[in-house]
Image (cartoon, rainbow, N blue to C red):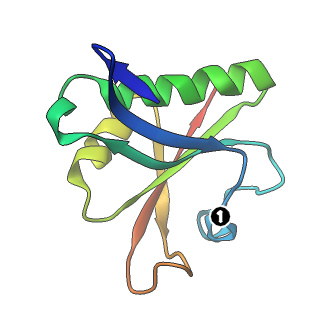
Amino acid sequence: MAYVDGLLAGVAALTEDQEPEYAQVGFDLNQRAIVTHRLAVDPAFRGRGVAHALLTQAEQLAHERGIRFLRIDTNSQNQVTQKLFPKLGYQYAGDITLSFRPGLRFLAYEKQL
């Protein structure tokens, strides 16, 4: 979670759970990775570095656990995250589909520490 002036500004689920579909872009699912799921920022706090702070938390968690990979995906329509992730060192890995979101296309990214 991220707070600004004591108010909840954003949330992300940080897990080691990788979607099986990540194999579509060649991710080795046997490698441990911190995966950021459901990155969300309150519209009132957008543009204030909240998403960056949440992704920094993911990186800190990876360091604490001795994990070298960060992975994340985003809806192909989300232009904001498609610009943000590369700025933070994530490399675009390719497009995936997710079985629980039929008909949508997602872009997968990875950052190696």
Q: What residue do we see at 36% from left, 45% from top? A: 40
Q: Indicate whether 71 appears above or below 23.
A: above
Q: What residue do we see at 36% from left, 35% from top? A: 10
| Residue 66 position within the rendered picture, expressed as x and y whole percent measured from the top left | 80, 24
Query: In what element is the residue under mark 1?
Result: loop
* 53 left or right of 13 in image: left
Q: Which residue is mark 1?
A: 19
* 20 left or right of 92 in image: right
Please identify the quadrant where the C terminus is shown: top right
Q: What amino acid is at disc 1?
A: Glu
Q: Indicate whether 113 appears above or below 104.
A: above
* 25 left or right of 66 in image: left
Q: Farthest residue to the bottom: give it.
A: 103
Q: Farthest residue to the front: give it.
A: 6
| Residue 55 position within the rendered picture, expressed as x and y whole percent measured from the top left | 47, 30
Q: Indicate whether 106 appears above or below 84.
A: below
